[in-house]
């Protein structure tokens, strides 16, 4: 299997200097490509000077995470792509279990490793942990991370299993299927594009897996800081767009109506917390979602016409927010 590790970079010289050495050292058998998303720092010259064995692919401007990867991967030939954030450290043996998983079952579309926190290496990392899921209202959570509660890795989730989504921080995908499904939704720009893609993979009859025998360490916040209004906006808007495109006809209206109510409540909480900027972000995310409905209807029609399966088995039937409020804040016995 021809494997290419693709790192999308934008002004990430510091991350490349810190994390690329481990990728080069421990990725035998795979080619490494740094796809530069129109950086204006010295990322490109740094890679050219210090890592001549790494292929450089230059995009003319910053297309965001989703469309940046789409444009880069359209120029890269491989059997599978390893999409790796520039702020991820890998260790010896990390790649083999992921590639072996794809080779073992042609119905597996994507795999993720166990993702631990780079700075707290016994803790799971927020963006992926030991595999991702959705609750019945579309809120993402993970084995090892529910809302803001992050568990320590004690080996409790070391079993490979099917999940709903693989983290974009590190995921292995079948190249032909990635292109067949249209890749990431470029309109997302960044955030939740991997969840949307994994949902479409399942609707097309494929499976998404986590393989904890592979582990990586993710710094996180490399694109946008966690308290960023821009990140909040993208998460609210993209989550609504994802639900609209992928939910079944029976679930669409009830789930969207409930989300309108819940998002409205969260906006009021931001006001009570004296964060009018976040209140405005939620409002703008909803307005932009409504304005995009014409385009989203076309995307939904195509997805629903081609669906051959359901992803419901990996959706938690309850509310993860309610469960968290009741003090049940770990994944144990959840699914």
Image (cartoon, helix red, strand yellow):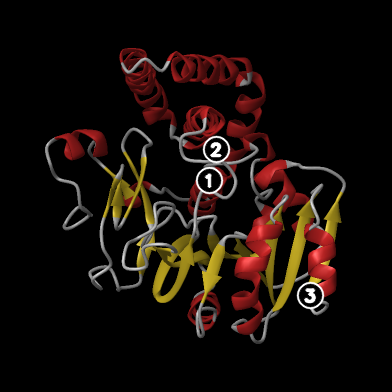
Q: Residues within 10 Å of mark 2 (few under 14, many from 20)?
A: some
Q: How crowded is mark 3: few (under 14 residues within 10 Å), some or many (20 or more)?
A: few
In front of the other: 113 or 79: 113
In front of the other: 75 or 121: 121
Quarter of the picture holding the N terminus? bottom right
**Gap between marks 2 and 1 measured at Cα:** 5 Å
Please name the residue that numbered disc 2 is placed on.
Answer: 304
Quarter of the picture holding the C terminus? bottom left
Secondary structure at badge 2 equals helix
- The answer to which image quadrant residue 258 occupies is top left
Using the image, determine if residue 221 lies above or below residue 124. Answer: above
x 38%, y 36%: residue: 138
How many numbered callouts?
3
**Gap between marks 1 and 3 measured at Cα:** 46 Å
Q: In this view, does 333 lie to the left or right of 122?
A: left
- Whether the residues at callouts 1 and 3 have beta carbons within 8 Å, the answer is no
Q: Residue 50 carries which label?
A: 3
Which residue is the extreme one toward the left?
Answer: 326
x 52%, y 41%: residue: 225
In front of the other: 113 or 231: 231
x 51%, y 52%: residue: 198
Residue 221: % across, % down: 52, 48
Please name the residue that numbered disc 1 is placed on.
Answer: 307
Q: How crowded is mark 1: few (under 14 residues within 10 Å), some or many (20 or more)?
A: some
């Amino acid at each position: 299997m021809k494997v290419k590790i693709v790192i999308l970079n934008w002004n990430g010289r510091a991350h490349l200097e810190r994390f690329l050495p481990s990728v080069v050292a421990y990725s035998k058998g795979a080619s490494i490509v740094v796809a530069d998303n129109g950086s204006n720092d010295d990322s490109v010259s740094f890679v050219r000077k210090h890592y001549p064995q790494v292929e450089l692919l230059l995009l003319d401007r910053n297309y965001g995470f989703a469309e940046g990867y789409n444009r880069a991967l359209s120029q890269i030939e491989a059997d599978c792509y390893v999409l790796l954030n520039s702020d991820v450290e890998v260790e010896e043996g990390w790649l083999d279990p992921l590639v072996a998983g794809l080779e073992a079952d042609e119905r597996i579309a994507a795999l993720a490793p166990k993702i631990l926190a780079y700075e707290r290496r016994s803790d799971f990392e927020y963006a992926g942990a030991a595999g991702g899921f959705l609750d019945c209202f579309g809120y993402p959570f993970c084995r090892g991370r529910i809302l803001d509660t992050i568990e320590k890795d004690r080996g409790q989730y070391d079993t490979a299993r099917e999940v709903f989504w693989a983290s974009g921080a590190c995921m292995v995908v079948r190249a032909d299927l990635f292109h067949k499904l249209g890749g990431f939704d470029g309109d997302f720009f960044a955030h939740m594009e991997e969840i949307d893609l994994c949902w479409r993979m399942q609707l097309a009859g494929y499976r998404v897996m986590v393989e904890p025998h592979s582990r990586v360490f993710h710094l996180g916040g490399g694109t946008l800081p966690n308290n960023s209004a821009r990140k909040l906006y993208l998460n609210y808007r993209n989550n609504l767009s994802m639900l609209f495109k992928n939910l079944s006809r029976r679930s669409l209206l009830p789930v969207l109506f409930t989300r309108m109510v819940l998002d409205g409540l969260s906006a009021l909480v931001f006001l009570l917390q004296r964060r009018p900027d976040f209140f405005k972000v939620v409002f703008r995310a909803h307005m932009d979602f409504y304005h995009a409905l014409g385009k989203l209807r076309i995307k939904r029609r195509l997805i629903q016409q081609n669906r051959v399966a359901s992803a419901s088995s990996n959706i938690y039937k309850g509310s993860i927010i309610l469960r968290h409020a009741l003090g049940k804040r770990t994944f144990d016995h959840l699914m």
